[in-house]
Image: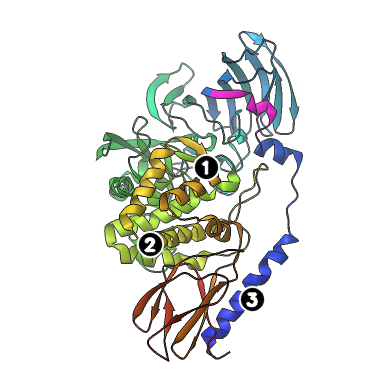
C-alpha cells in the first residue's frame, strides 16, 4: 500500500464524515432574512417596469440624497407595497399622482400604503425620496456598501458594490432578484471636478449652478438590482468599436487620469475577451447599452454594461495565478472573469441567491474556455484542473432558498470543474458549444431558477443529470471511483455518492482507453494485463481508490 493509497483513504474518510458535522452548524434565519429573500405577497402583486434613480452624492460628508421613481404594472390589485431600504438610510416620503402616501418601517423594509385603486393591468408609479449616510463597505466587493476613498491626487474616488447584501444598501427598490425593470435612467449629481460612470449609455451631461454636474445614464435592457452602480472619480475616457456577431459594439473605458497609459495597454484584452466569449456563448447580451470597463477602488465586479476594474493593470489575480499552472498569468483575471458575467449573471440571472452557482460556476468555467480559445484545449484543461486546490467541499454549493442565503464558495472552482466534467460526458465539443450558446439564446435576459438550468442541460445533452447535479451541487462528497484488479478482470464502482449516482468515466488501462459506466454496485470487465495500471482521466472531477490487494 503506497503513501498515495493511504492519503486517498484519509481524504475519503474526511469527506464521508463532513455532512454529519455540518448538519449541526445550520444557520438561524430571521424574519428580516425572509422579507429580504422571499417573494412576499407585498412584492408579488406588482411587476417592475422602470426605475429613475436620481441622486446627489456628496463626498464631503459621505451622504446620498435623492429620489427613485418606481413604475410598475398591477398583476393583482393590492394596496400594500414592500420597498426595501437598509439602515441607516431613511425614506422621507412616498408620493403617487401628487398625493403623499403613508408608510411604516420594519427593519430594512418599508410598507407603503397606497390610496388609489390599483386596477389589474394598469401602470402606476411611486416617487420615493430618501437619504443619509449609506453603509460603508469594509471589504469591497465582498461586503456591500459604498467605498469612499481618495486617488493619488487626493481627489474623491467612490464606488458602489452590493451583490448579496442588496442594492437597498444605497437606494430604495424592490430588492429581490426575481423582478427586473425593463429599462432604467440613472441620474447622478457630483462635484463638477468629478465624473460619474454608471450603467448603459451616457444620455446627457448637465452643468448646474452650484458647482455640480449631473450625469444621466440610460439602460435600455432589463437590469438586475445589484448590477446598478455608481463610480465617481477624476476619470478620463477612451473608446473603440468591436465588430461582433451583432454588428458594431461600442467599448468605452474610464480610468483615473494617472492610469491612462497603463489602461491603454492592459485594456487591449477586452476585444479578445469579447471574441472568445461570443464564440462560446453567443453575442454579447447588451449591444444597445455598450460595453464598459470602469476603474474602481476595489478588485472588480460584474455590474451590467459597467464592469468595474481594480486589478492593478497586470495579468493574473492581483498578479498571481489562481491555478498555479502558469496559464493564469496569460490574462487579466478581472477583465476576463467579470466580463464573463455579462452572459452569466447579467443576461441569465438567478432568481434566488441560493442558486448563485448559475452565475459563478459558468463564469469560472469561462476562464477555462478563454484559455482554450487562445492557447488550446490542453492548456484550458490544465488551467481548470489547477484550480481544484481552491475547492473546500465544506457545505453544498446550493444555499437555502427564500432567506437570501448563498451556498459554498465552491460554486466557483467546484462548479467550473463540474461543468468541465459534464463536457467530458457529452464527449462532443461542437454539441457542447451549441448547448452553451443555446443557454444564452433561450434564457436571454431572463431570470431563472437553478432547476431550469439543470433541466435544460439534461434535455440538451440527452442525459438524465439529476443525480449528477445532486452530487456536485447538493452534496459535499467527491465521487470515488473504487476498483481492484484480479487476474485479467477489473472490478469497479462509484462510492461516496448520492443514491442512484451513475456517471460514465473514461479510464486508461495500461495504455488502453475505456469508457465505463459504474454504479453503486461492483461491475467487472475483462482487461488484457494481469498487472493492469488503471488511471482515471484527470478531466473528470472525481477521486480514485485502488482496492487491489486489500
As measured in the structure, the alpha-carbon distance from the residue carrying label 2 to the one carrying label 1 is: 30 Å
Residue 124 appears in the picture as rendered: yes
Eye-nearest disc, 2 or 3: 3
Asked if residue 16 lies left or right of residue 432, the reply is right
Residue 413 x/y as whole percent: 49, 60
Classify mark 3: helix, strand or loop.
Answer: helix
- Relative to 198, residue 92 above or below: above
Residue 298 appears in the picture as rendered: no
Classify mark 1: helix, strand or loop.
Answer: strand
Of marks 2 and 1, which one's residue comes earlier in the chain?
1
Of marks 2 and 3, which one's residue comes earlier in the chain?
3
Q: Nearer the viewer, residue 461 or 43?
A: 461
Q: Which mark is residue 135?
A: none
Eye-nearest disc, 2 or 1: 2
Residue matched to label 2: 328
Callout 3 crowding tier (Cα within 10 Å): few <14, some 14–19, many ≥20: few
Q: Quadrant of residue 7?
A: bottom right
- Relative to 505, residue 312 above or below: above
As measured in the structure, the alpha-carbon distance from the residue carrying label 2 to the one carrying label 3 is: 32 Å
Callout 1 crowding tier (Cα within 10 Å): few <14, some 14–19, many ≥20: some
Q: Which mark is residue 149?
A: 1
The residue sitting at 42% across, 55% down in the picture is 365
Magenta part of the chain: 39-48
Classify mark 2: helix, strand or loop.
Answer: helix
Q: Which mark is residue 13?
A: 3
Residue 364 x/y as whole percent: 45, 55
Question: Answer yes or no: do the residues labelled 2 and 1 have beta carbons within 8 Å?
Answer: no
Callout 2 crowding tier (Cα within 10 Å): few <14, some 14–19, many ≥20: many
Amino acid at each position: 500500500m503506497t503513501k498515495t493509497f493511504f492519503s486517498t483513504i484519509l481524504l475519503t474518510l474526511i469527506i464521508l464524515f463532513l455532512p454529519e458535522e455540518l448538519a449541526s452548524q445550520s444557520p438561524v434565519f430571521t424574519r428580516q432574512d425572509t422579507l429580504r429573500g422571499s417573494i412576499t405577497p407585498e412584492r408579488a402583486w406588482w411587476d417592475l417596469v422602470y426605475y429613475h434613480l436620481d441622486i446627489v452624492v456628496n463626498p464631503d460628508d459621505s451622504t446620498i440624497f435623492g429620489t427613485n421613481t418606481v413604475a410598475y404594472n398591477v398583476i393583482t390589485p393590492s394596496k400594500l407595497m414592500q420597498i426595501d431600504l437598509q439602515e441607516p438610510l431613511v425614506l422621507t416620503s412616498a408620493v403617487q399622482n401628487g398625493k403623499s402616501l403613508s408608510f411604516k418601517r420594519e427593519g430594512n423594509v418599508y410598507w407603503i400604503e397606497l390610496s388609489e385603486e390599483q386596477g389589474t393591468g394598469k401602470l402606476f408609479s411611486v416617487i420615493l425620496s430618501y437619504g443619509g449616510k449609506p453603509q460603508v463597505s469594509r471589504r469591497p466587493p465582498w461586503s456591500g456598501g459604498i467605498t469612499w476613498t481618495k486617488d493619488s491626487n487626493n481627489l474623491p474616488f467612490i464606488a458602489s458594490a452590493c451583490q448579496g447584501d442588496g442594492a437597498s444598501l444605497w437606494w430604495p427598490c424592490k430588492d429581490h432578484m426575481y423582478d427586473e425593470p425593463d429599462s432604467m435612467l440613472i441620474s447622478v449629481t457630483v462635484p463638477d471636478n468629478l465624473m460619474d460612470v454608471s450603467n448603459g449609455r451616457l444620455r446627457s451631461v448637465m452643468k448646474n449652478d452650484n458647482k455640480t454636474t449631473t450625469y444621466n445614464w440610460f439602460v435600455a435592457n432589463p437590469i438586475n438590482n445589484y448590477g446598478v452602480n455608481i463610480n465617481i472619480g477624476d476619470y478620463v475616457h477612451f473608446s473603440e468599436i468591436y465588430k461582433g456577431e451583432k454588428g458594431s459594439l461600442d467599448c468605452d473605458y474610464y480610468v483615473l487620469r494617472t492610469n491612462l497609459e497603463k489602461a491603454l495597454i492592459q485594456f487591449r484584452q477586452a476585444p479578445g475577451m469579447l471574441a472568445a466569449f461570443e464564440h462560446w456563448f453567443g453575442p454579447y447580451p447588451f449591444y444597445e447599452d455598450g460595453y464598459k470597463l470602469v476603474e474602481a477602488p476595489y478588485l472588480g465586479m460584474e455590474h451590467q454594461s459597467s464592469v468595474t476594474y481594480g486589478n492593478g493593470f497586470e495579468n493574473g489575480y492581483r498578479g498571481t495565478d489562481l491555478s498555479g499552472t502558469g496559464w493564469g498569468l496569460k490574462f487579466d483575471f478581472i477583465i476576463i472573469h467579470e466580463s464573463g458575467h455579462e452572459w452569466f449573471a447579467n443576461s441569465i440571472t438567478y432568481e434566488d441567491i441560493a442558486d448563485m452557482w448559475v452565475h459563478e460556476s459558468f463564469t469560472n468555467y469561462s476562464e477555462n474556455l478563454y484559455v482554450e480559445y487562445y492557447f488550446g484545449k490542453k492548456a484550458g484543461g490544465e488551467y481548470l484542473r489547477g484550480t481544484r486546490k481552491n475547492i473546500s467541499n465544506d457545505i453544498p454549493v446550493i444555499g437555502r432558498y427564500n432567506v437570501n442565503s448563498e451556498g459554498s464558495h465552491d460554486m466557483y472552482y467546484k462548479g467550473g470543474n463540474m461543468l468541465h466534467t459534464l463536457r467530458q460526458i457529452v464527449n462532443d465539443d461542437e454539441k457542447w458549444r451549441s448547448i452553451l450558446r443555446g443557454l444564452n439564446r433561450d434564457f436571454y435576459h431572463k431570470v431563472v431558477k437553478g432547476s431550469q438550468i439543470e433541466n435544460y442541460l439534461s434535455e440538451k445533452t440527452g442525459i438524465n443529470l439529476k443525480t449528477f447535479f445532486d452530487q456536485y451541487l447538493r452534496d459535499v462528497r467527491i465521487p470515488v471511483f473504487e476498483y481492484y484488479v484480479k487476474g485479467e478482470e477489473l472490478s469497479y464502482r462509484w462510492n461516496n455518492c448520492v443514491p442512484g449516482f451513475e456517471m460514465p468515466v473514461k479510464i486508461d488501462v495500461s495504455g488502453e482507453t475505456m469508457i465505463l459506466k459504474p454504479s453503486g454496485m461492483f461491475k467487472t470487465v475483462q482487461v488484457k494485463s494481469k498487472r493492469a495500471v488503471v488511471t482515471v482521466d484527470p478531466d473528470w472531477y472525481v477521486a480514485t481508490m485502488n482496492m487491489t490487494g486489500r
